[in-house]
Image (cartoon, rainbow, N blue to C red):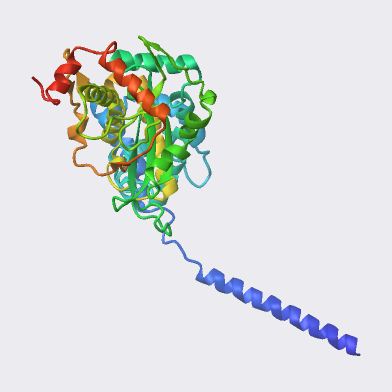
Amino acid sequence: MAAANQRRALQACYFLILAVLKRRRQRGRKEKRKHRFWVRSIFQKREELGAFHTLAQKLRLDDREYFYRYTRMSPERFQHLLTLVEPVIAKRPCRSRKPIPAAERLMVTLRYLATGDSQQSQSFTFRIGRATISNILRETLQAIWDALNKAYLAPPSNTADWIHIAEKYEEEWNFPHCLGAIDGKHIMIECPANAGSAYYNYKNFHSIVLLALCDAIYCFSFVDIGAYGGSNDASVLASSLYGSAFDTIPSTLNLPVPAKCGSKMLPYVLLGDDIFPLKPWLMKPYPGKHLDEAQRVYNYRLSRARRTVENAFGILNAKWRILRRAIKANVDLVDKIAKACVCLHNYLQLTDNAIYIPAGFVDSKDSSGNIIPGNWRSATEADEGLRNLHRISGNRYTYEAGSSRSDFKDYLKNEGQVPWQWDHVRSCGQKL
């Protein structure tokens, strides 16, 4: 009898639980948000009135100059880039709706990078939903990085490639044994959610760090993207892959060994400014104002050669306006934006150079060695998106590093001198 009562009690509890669960499911279905419509009416006319199907196609067929201004590349280069990313970003058709074509997805992304307008603005322009724009940007930015970085952002893989860069630097900028110029920038971002002070830097804004090495023709050899803006700037280089490799195991990079330059045995080095520490493989200027003539010649020649990385960042900022202001996006999307911009910069510099960097856009030099400032400087004069890293003062350095700098100074004063360097330093940089 007791066992039968127990079974009935368990059955009653079982049915009670089922009834409660059923009521909860019914309540959940009733409270579920209902969409007012499947697709907004303005988005239903995307193929008739959207910017890709109207303005972009008109420019592509009839106005190459304005198509370049619209996308930062020629129609042929756009088509080539599309063939590289289309296998990744193309979507399969389904019964409920037509997918957005890969060409339109790429156009949305390039326009976003070129203008710096918000995702909501792109939504209105292309007549695509705001959430869809966000998904398109994430997928296409990653596809651009995956398609271009190995071919157009690959660092030198052997000693001969490094030596070729050094020879180009000496030919163009009269600095021997230079493997590249290095610099870093803060990319301004809006305050990330729950980030604390990690991204808040000493200049009182939130940022991530873009550290880059540039060759003699304004192409980035390697980049390190995503370090916290609030971190010590010296540690950004030390913790980067290439900074640690140069410091500890340079053989992994196949760097050339020191070689004769005139009567001096000079190492192959990178060129940086005062934000970086002096190392045997990283030359920086002599600090202070009361320098002798040889030191001022060295500083002038080094500053003149490292203009390449300054110009590379200037071109990047002038062409891709998303970098000109604080980027309103999650940190992972900002990281994708920076990587895509760097890849597109190298890609266009190596394949569409005459259009991407027109005459007079970058710094040039006359027959007397005087520098003529490029047009990018006036184009980005009031921009705040890319900021310099913090200058580090009082860096200690090893005897080997100081000796290397002294050897470069002596070489540039004597065997490696150029006639116009004396006019410059003796006139304190003023033209005679």
State the residue at coordinates (14%, 21%): 426
The image quadrant of residue 277 is top left
For residue 336, say whether it is visible: no
Give above or below for 247 relative to 172. Answer: below
State the residue at coordinates (37%, 53%): 40
Residue 385 spot, x, y in % from top left: 28, 43
The image quadrant of residue 394 is top left
Residue 86 spot, x, y in % from top left: 47, 31
* 153 left or right, relative to 49: right
Residue 248 spot, x, y in % from top left: 52, 31
Q: In which quadrant is the C terminus drawn?
A: top left
State the residue at coordinates (41%, 53%): 198
Frontmost residue, 298 versus 242: 298
Frontmost residue, 115 versus 239: 239
Residue 253 spot, x, y in % from top left: 51, 24
Q: In which quadrant is the N terminus drawn?
A: bottom right
- Count how many numbered circles sit on residues in the image: 0
Outermost residue on the right side: it is 1
For residue 251, say whether it is visible: yes
* 245 left or right, relative to 397: right
Outermost residue on the bottom side: it is 1
Frontmost residue, 410 versus 169: 410
* 185 left or right, relative to 34: left
The image quadrant of residue 117 is top left
